[in-house]
Image (spheres, helix red, strand yellow):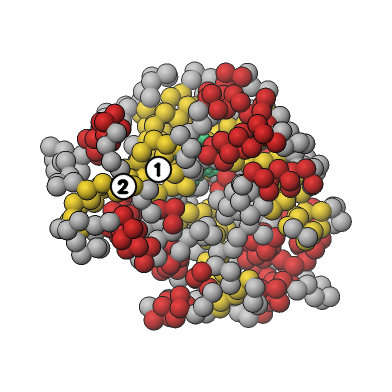
Amino acid sequence: MPIEFTPFPPQLAAHYRARGYWIDQPLTRALDTQAAARPEAIAMIDGPHQLTYAEVARQAAAMADRLRQQGFGPGDRAVVQLPNCTEFVIVFHALLRAGIAPVNAIFSHRQLEMTSYIDQLRPALLIGDRGHELFADDRFLTAIDAQGIRPAQVILRGETLADWLTDTTEPAQPATPTAPDEVAFFQLSGGSTGTPKLIPRTHNDYDYSIRASAEICGLTPQTRFLCALPAAHNFTLSSPGILGVFHAGGCIVMAPSPEPAACFELIARYRIDLAALVPSAVQLWLTHAESHGAPAPLRQLLVGGASFAPTTAARVPPVLGAALQQVFGMAEGLVNYTRLGDDPDTTFTTQGRPISPDDEIRVLDPETGQPAPDGQPGALAVRGPYTFRGYYRSPAHNVQAFDADGFYHSGDLVVRRPDGYLRVVGRIKDQINRGGEKIAAEEVEALLLRHPAIRQAALIALPDATMGERSVAFIVSAEPLKPTALRRHLSGLGLASYKLPDHFRSLDALPLTPIGKTDKRRLRALLTEEDHNEGALT
Ligand code: OOB
């Protein structure tokens, strides 16, 4: 049974095919093409390990064959959680080749997030890492077993995963991917509500965004890309990312994190020319470069995921010796790039323009829903050849996120220039963007309320020079509570560490709007006042 999802309307699908965006090929197309055309070219480097395209393809085929022998195949789902490593890329291709749709969890996700993905997706397979706290012992597996949601097959890196990837001498069985206009895999939403939402992506839509991104960023077989942000993230995977590099036939060098000293060494050792970073990491690289010199031979830096101050952006070419491309994208689809060769003002002060001439952008007055004039901020709505049409099994949420014309409302406030370039100027979704990592306010608030002494809770963003934003939790509680105890409460519920509030603030009552919702504007104003009075944030 194909995986259910909201398909693109037939008329639009026909248009996207006619324009050559959708080419009805599986997402494994790029790897298969490179393995056939340039089998001996190095595809990936991870520490001492180097893999050619032929080896990557053989290992992916070996795993796909074995999965199918064991009865897994089209219609099945998988939850995968691997760090930045070659196995992440091979497993992704193996699953696609077998027709199994994975969701790639971010490595920092913990019990709460992982349980939610497993609960929503009911996967046949769980692929994790023994080195992750969740799989260091059997407690997590026992817990999901008790809930009746333990996947049939659990494969762990550091345990049995290597066996699954062992390539055999037998010729690989033909691939059995899902149909190109069906679900290939799921992306993860940054979200603004309680549960992290799953975003079905089809082969056709995702592959188009990859091919177009690779072209916009000028990738070639000579490209050497530093994969330093979490590999599972849409930016790292496809903008143009890992899959864009495979499309071009270049080489991916894995880094465990964007930490500058290690990354600069990798750049020098492996002659890396392209990297992708969030703004908070760019800050660290700039500081490091000022005392250690530019990371030669880096030529090009993609920066996205959170707002990037124009003054910092302007320092990238002189200090890092690399051309800058800004990227404003979302796991739901739409990706914008500044183009190589854009004038400095455009490169430093905008977040680019959409990939496709058929990305339909609306900028709407948030109050009236009517189009905002160019140059005026408005809420972003988008429809196009690679923007999804509905969250997985979330009808109530989809009614909120989509309008009658099928436009997805991203919750971003943007200003559009007459030439179509966008500037992200704010946000109407209830989310904190902490160095590119997204925190849904409602998720953390609901968990705070599970503390017996907490009566009310509200999470808001605090502007921060290094992270862009940090989170502040306002709480109303029956008894005084220490930040350490509150963090322990949240951590004990299995919440990822980056979602733990950076600061806590106690109030007698939360301010309310006239209709009785928490007045977050007033809370933000309180913080600004405190800032001036040097009030105590704990
Ligand atoms: C990327 O994807 P997500 O799904 O983690 O987050 C999307 C949200 C956007 O709606 C926007 O609020 C924010 O992240 N964002 C930016 C931005 N890029 C993303 N805000 C300001 N300036 C930017 N350049 O973050 C993502 C996906 C693909 C490529 C790049 C980023």
> In the picture shown, does residue 517 fall above or below 346?
below
Tag 2 near tag 1, CB within 8 Å: no
The residue beneath circle 2 is 538
Spatial CA distance of label 2 from label 1 is: 13 Å
The residue beneath circle 1 is 470
Q: Does the closest atom of ligand 1 sit within 8 Å of the Cβ of label 1?
A: no
Q: Nearer the viewer, residue 282 or 196?
A: 282
Query: Of the residues tagged 2 and 1, which is closer to the observer?
Result: 2
> In the picture shown, does residue 170 fall above or below 121?
below
Q: Residues within 10 Å of mark 2 (few under 14, many from 20)?
A: few
Task: Pinpoint residue 338: horizontal percent, then vertical percent.
Answer: 60, 28
Q: Which of 193 and 511 is in front in this view?
A: 511
Label 2 sits on what residue type? Thr
> Residue 5, labelled with which disc?
none
At x 32% / y 27%, what residue is drawn? Answer: 365
Label 1 sits on what residue type? Arg
First-in-chain label (2 vs 1)? 1
Residue 89, picture quadrant: bottom right
Task: Note whether residue 158 is visible.
Answer: yes
Q: How crowded is mark 1: few (under 14 residues within 10 Å), some or many (20 or more)?
A: many
Task: Pinpoint residue 329: horizontal percent, then vertical percent.
Answer: 52, 39
At x 65% / y 31%, what residue is drawn? Answer: 290
